[in-house]
Image: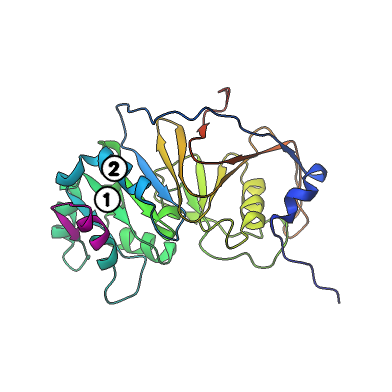
Amino acid sequence: MTRRPPITFMLFGHACLLLYVTATTSAKQPISESAGAGPLVVVGGGGTPDIVLTKMLELAGGETARTVILPQASSRSDRGQSAAQMFRERGVKQVDVVEFDDVTAARHLIEAADLIWFPGGQQKRLIDALTEAKLAETVRQKHQSGAVIGGTSAGAAVMSKVMIPSSPKEQGLQHGNTPIVSGLGLCPTLVIDQHFVERQRFGRLLSAVIDHPKIIGVGISERTAIVVRQNKFVVMGEGSVVVLDARRAELTRVAEGAPQSARKLRVDVLAAGDRFNLELTATR
């Protein structure tokens, strides 16, 4: 039996069979500051570039920002400590690594935070811990009240409405192949995939977007971030961000496990300074 080759970015070379690809020529402009829910700083893993960390601290109030690290995505005994050191080295005066042994104390620290940071690990471990401690809603309320929420790798994936908790059942574009579970919902219109280019995750995100066309797929390379505010985001960092948008695509319903079919699915490949408007009717 012949095995199927893995799905990689070679899919771009065959995009004419499936996708309508649109290049983005957004202007390189500063991030605008606006009222409402707090900014989201979503990093694709592999380390947080200085320019991203600088912007995040600027948004949160600088060195006086009360910073909380929620490290529950990791199972390491020293979890959260390297993240805390990252902020302390930038002069942040109050940094707390918060465990959930005392949920009341944890809630008070989260409620007082100007900046909440999720380090990497396993996104399902993180969302399960927040749910079990009944602190997921506390984080959502802080976001709505204006706190800056940031995260990298698994800490990035957990911010979206739905998230991909594990690798697909097999390599391929089949209906139901990519598992989806609920995330925090801080980005209600997105599903975020991290380490996107480096771990060749184009196929699994594409499959998820075709199965869930109301959700925009955003694949973020390592050492790259999006800063989300008011239904728009801007790219920062060193790599690429790939946006998969099937909201206006022509989709064919297929049975579970059958090959997926989509036409006029939009793909944008973005770099530092590029902007994307999440509104369906917006001109990008």
Figure check: 42 above or below 214: below
Residue hosting label 1 = 116
Give x and y (percent) for residue 66. 17, 48
- Residue at (49, 40) in percent of width and height: 272
Q: Report whether residue 185 is seen.
A: yes
Percent position of residue 67, x then y = 20, 51
Residue shown at 40% from the left, 59% from the top: 47
Report how far apart the C-alphas of labels 2 and 1 lie in the structure.
6 Å
Q: Are marks 2 and 1 in contact (CB under 8 Å)?
A: yes
Q: Which residues are magenta?
A: 85-96
* Quadrant in the picture for the N terminus: bottom right
Give the residue at mark 2: 148
* Label 2 crowd (10 A; few <14 / some 14-19 / many >=20): many
SS assignment at label 2 = strand
Is-magenta flag for residue 138?
no
In the image, residue 214 lies at what x, y percent?
Answer: 58, 39
